[in-house]
Image: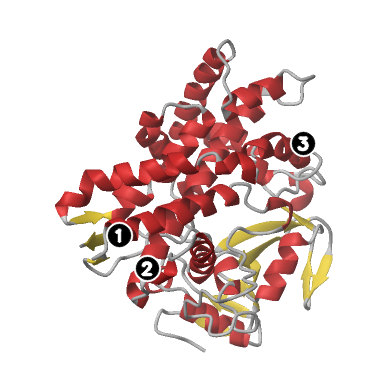
Amino acid sequence: MGCAMGMSIDVERRSVSLDPRDPAFFNDPYPAYHAIRATTPVFFWEQYGFWCFARHAQVSALLRDRRFGRQILHLTSRQKLGWSEPPAHLRSFLDVERHSLLELEPPEHTRLRNLINRAFVSRQVERLAPRIESLANELIDRFEARGAVDLLEHFATPIPVIVIAELLGVPGEMWARLLDWSHRMVAMYQFGVTRAVEDSAVAATQEFVAFLRDYVEARRGARTDDLISQLISAESEAGRLSEEELIATCILVLNAGHEATVHGVGNGVKALLEAHIDPSRAFATPAASAAMVEELLRFDAPLHLFTRYALEDIDLDGVALRQGDRIGLLLGAANRDPERFSNPDLIDVSRSPNPHVAFGGGIHFCIGAPLARLEMEIALPILFRRLPGLRLAEPPRYRDSYHFHGLAALPVAW
């Protein structure tokens, strides 16, 4: 079976050939997802070299299945897995990754997550609402008179990066520099990474780590209520947190924390404008805004692929997995599964419940989800209220960055 984007499905072998860098795919992956789910929802993705799962029930269950994890070398060795040693030139990047909350399993994961949870629990996040509101209005003030703008660059991107910088305790005016480091590091998670991308990511990592080491050292004698100060306090409590873990946590909070909101806002505005949904009704009340945000996250999620390792030998849906095998969970496909969501290709704010997996699930459920939701629930109503004639100036295109799913730009006019 084939389709216009060059995908081929071998039902008998349960395999799919689909280039993640094909513009027809990353600009609109949903036809491919529908075709895969209908024929071979558990499939071997040839380009990635691992088994993937596309149905909501499977993805949701596997996000919570403790037989899978984000790391494997705590249970076995590279030699036993047949893995070669990582390239020496990636050492700086991998040293940070090794201490990242997203790459850990219990008990290390539990200890670290509990330490930073304090900054992201709902009551802490809600304190940021006035700042998010003023920031959204300030940004619109800067471009309102122009009549046209790239909304991704001038609205969707600055809000989460500035908020996270201030949450960490880093001056908000540094946001462009932080964003540059983040983009260069996050590029490592894309398909088909080149040596140039690797070298750029390593350089960004070294610059980011050096900045944070100096900043943390200065902060030790001048603590406030920001996240870095909280982590310094945790560091001094009987070795509960090493400086390496502190720095890796700060980097993760920025790198993972802004991506979902930037593209949640960008993808959401695009979806609303293309569907010609009346924003005065969509955001009529706080409850309506919250429901709309959930539906937009389901409809066009910012993250489409989340990988895990089999921690033991497992037979799963007829697939024999060995310890150390990687699997891929297609979050974007799960969110459009007609077995779970009626009319999944339509925006329906009345969906209740709306068990989308845009933020993952299980112990690695996105720790920044309450903040991402709050930023979208505040920023989107302000945007449509301030710019009532908002419309797409040209068809937006997505970035060549699968498994992230976000726009390269969002040109709008009013």
Q: Is residue 319 above or below residue 68?
A: below
Horizontal placement of 366 versus 281: left or right? Answer: right
- The residue identified by callout 1 is 410
Precedes in sequence: disc 3 or disc 2: 3
Please name which of the two marks, 3 or 2, marks the residue nearer to the observer: 2
Mark 3 Cα shell of 10 Å, populated few (<14), some (14-19), many (≥20): some
- The residue identified by callout 2 is 280
Distance of label 3 from label 1 (alpha carbons): 40 Å
Precedes in sequence: disc 3 or disc 1: 3
- Res 87 seen here: no
Q: Which mark is residue 375?
A: none
Precedes in sequence: disc 1 or disc 2: 2
Pick the front one: 152 or 131:
131
**Contact (Cβ within 8 Å) of mark 1 with mark 2:** no
**Figure quadrant of the C terminus:** bottom left
Distance of label 1 from label 2 (alpha carbons): 21 Å
Q: Percent x, y for residue 395?
A: 27, 70
Q: Percent x, y for residue 343?
A: 53, 85
Q: Which mark is residue 111?
A: 3
